Image (spheres, rainbow, N blue to C red):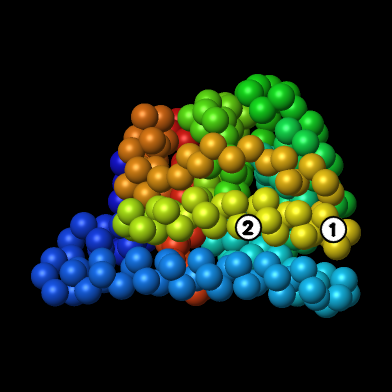
Amino acid sequence: MEKREGVLNSPSDRGVSRNGLRAILRTAWQPFFCLIYFVISIVQLVVLLCLPRKTFRRFFNRVREAGCRTNIQQMRPHLKPGESVLDIGAGDGWLGHRLQQELGVIVEGVDVSDYNLAPIKVHLYDGATLPFADTSFDAAMLVFVLHHCSNPESVLSEALRVTKEGVFVFEDTYDSPWQKLFTLWNDVHTNILHGLIKVLKGYARPGVTRMPMPFRFRSVRGWLDVFSRYRVTVEDIRVRPSGYKPLTHTMFFLKKEK
């Protein structure tokens, strides 16, 4: 398995190599950071609930657009105009739509429920077998999807089956037990609690609050262990902080071995 600079510089690897006073201090402050953000996240829910609908929509439109820009920038080196991409777990479809606009690729989505709000074609499926023949697409993307799957390995296998080149995997990752605990809370906070407020504000479809939550999170090293079981090369890894939240977002690009 190829190890690129992004892997060597990831928080997980740095955490393994650190020692001494710096590591002790880092471990000591994390519980307080997680606790502080937990309190902030509760206050945030109250604020969002009280926002006027137009202000609420403007805020989340900006958040969504910023997330799309970052994800597209990370995928850009691995995609060419005209290539076909399958967005597995497409959600509201907006990332796929923006990917088409920015990179000139052709995107179709697939999901277990209809959350789509964007002008792309989204298929419904059973969550087990993708309704496409082998190598139907140049690439596929699983954007913060695998931790919502009861059997993420099966979903990844299907993604690799229907692609010619490779699969993008985006995941929330952690670097310590405290970050892992916060990552679990963040999943509920972001998807279920935010989702409920979005439905009340007319910003999302009701099905979003019924999203499965099996909490299949892993560290960067944990995901690399999973990927090592497949005939793929981890060609690119991008680890970035999640703003002020005590967790990280990681993109893996898995290149299929010929």
- Vertical side of 70 occupied by 119: above or below: above
Give the residue type that dot 2 points to: Thr
- Vertical side of 64 occupied by 191: above or below: above
Q: Residue at x 26, y 70 (%)?
A: 28
Relative side of 146 to 20, left or right: right
Q: Which residue is mark 1?
A: 200
Q: Quadrant of the C terminus?
A: top left
Relative side of 91 to 159, left or right: right
Q: Quadrant of residue 224?
A: top left
Relative side of 155 to 183, left or right: right
The local crowd at label 1, few if under 14, some if 14 to 19, many if 20 or more residues have their Cα within 10 Å, is some
Image position, residue 138 (x, y; %): 63, 39
- SS category of the residue bearing label 1: helix
Front-lying residue, 113 or 140: 113
Q: Which residue is mark 2?
A: 190
Q: Answer with mark 1 or mark 2, whichever residue precedes in sequence.
A: 2
Q: Residue at x 18, y 65 (%)?
A: 18
